Each structure stands twice: as C-alpha cells, then as structure tokens.
Image (cartoon, coloured by chain):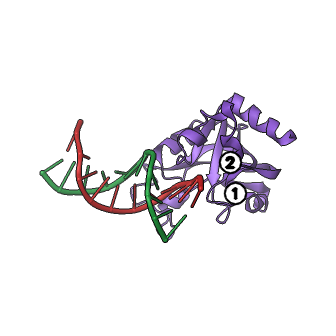
Chain colours: A purple, B green, C red
DNA sequence: GCCAACGTTGGC
DNA sequence: GCCAACGTTGGC
C-alpha cells in the first residue's frame, strides 16, 4: 500500500469542485510529466493521496482523495480543443495516462507548506526536495506524521 | 511579477 | 549522446 500527493491549483480545481462531480470522482487528467505519469501507472485501486493546493494562499495539503481506477489513457491528450492536447499521444499508442480519484475528506484547515517545512522528520519528503513534481509518492511515515498534525 | 529549479526539444 | 535554448512550475 502506497500513499501519494496530487497537486492542483485551487483556482483551477479544488476539493469543492471534486465533491461536486458525479460520484465525487474525476480523472486526474492533464499531467504531462513522465515521472508523474509513471507514478500514476503504479497506483492501485483503494490507495489514498493528499490533495495539495499549489500557487495558493497558503499553499498546502487540503485533504485526502482515493484512487478508484487504475491508470488509463488520458483522453484530453487526444482532443485538439483541449489545452492538454498532445498530437504525439494517439489512441493506438497513448503517451499520457490518468487514474480516477474520489473525494474522501477535506481537512478543517489547510496544512500549509510553511508548517510542513518546520517539521524535521518531513525534510526528506518529495514535496520539499522535488517541489515541481505534480504527482508524488508519500512515505507511510510521512503520511502518518501529517495526520497527527490535524490533532494539534 | 520575479526567478530558481528543472524538464523538454532539437540541432549537431 | 551532448548541450544550449527554451518553456513551465511554483514559492515568494
């Protein structure tokens, strides 16, 4: 069982938007980075991840979502009208993939990046060492530490 | 709005 | 396969 972190700009797509979707579920499409794609392809149904707000005030972890389907081809890559269109990705040989994710819960308050940076045991977290990666693996230990912050 | 970090592209 | 040029991400 692995844990993950999914980034989104809340002005573009946030937890309320996810909650409003049919079945509170959406394909995590638009990812155009190979490392992030490979992480999604390794995800299993039932695994959970943090929903992270980037370019936000404040940026930070806003809640939890769950993987509800294995990675499948990202349809937005095939659509010339989509901002995520990629002519190099074809139905025969798709380049980009996405899992479907479901709303689980929103934290009462966003756990800010500033707060996370202050915790020594989180200093190796991918969020802090490879800040640009938009889909990340979170270690179980990190996952648990972050949940204990909710009780403070 | 700036800019550091870093991923991608394409010429050679 | 190298690497310069360029584009994007995301914190501040």
- Are the numbered discs 1 and 2 placed on the same chain, yes or no? yes
Left or right: A60 as drawn, with respect to A128: right
Q: Which circle marks residue A58 in the picture?
A: 1
Q: What SS does tag 2 mark? A: helix
The disc, 1 or 2, on the residue closer to the chain's N-terminal end is 1
Residue A7, visible in the rendered structure: yes
Q: Position of residue A37 (x, y in %)?
A: 52, 44
Q: Which residue is mark 2?
A: A114
Q: Is residue A152 above or below residue A98?
A: above
| Mark 2 burial class by Cα count in 10 Å: few <14, some 14-19, many 20+ | few
Q: Residue at x 71, y 28 (%)?
A: A141
Q: Which circle marks residue A98 in the picture?
A: none
Q: Are marks 1 and 2 in contact (CB under 8 Å)?
A: yes
Q: Position of residue A31 (x, y in %)?
A: 53, 53
Q: Name the subunit of mark 2.
A: A
Left or right: A126 as drawn, with respect to A111: left
Q: Is residue A16 above or below residue A40?
A: below
Quarter containing the N terminus of chain A: top right
Viewer-nearest residue: A4 or A53? A53
């Amino acid at each position: 069982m692995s844990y993950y972190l999914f980034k989104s700009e809340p002005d573009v797509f946030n937890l309320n938007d996810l909650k409003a979707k049919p079945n509170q579920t959406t394909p995590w499409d638009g990812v155009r980075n190979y490392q992030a794609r490979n992480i999604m392809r390794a995800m299993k149904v039932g695994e959970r991840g943090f929903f992270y707000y980037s370019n936000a005030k404040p940026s930070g972890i806003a809640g939890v979502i769950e993987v509800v389907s294995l990675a499948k081809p990202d349809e937005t890559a095939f659509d010339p009208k989509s901002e995520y269109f990629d002519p190099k990705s074809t139905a025969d040989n798709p380049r980009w993939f996405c899992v479907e994710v479901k709303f689980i819960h929103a934290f009462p308050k966003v756990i800010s990046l500033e707060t996370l940076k202050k915790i020594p045991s989180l200093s190796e977290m991918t969020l802090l060492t490879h800040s640009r990666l938009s889909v990340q693996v979170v270690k179980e230990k990190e996952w648990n530490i972050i949940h204990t912050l909710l009780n403070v």
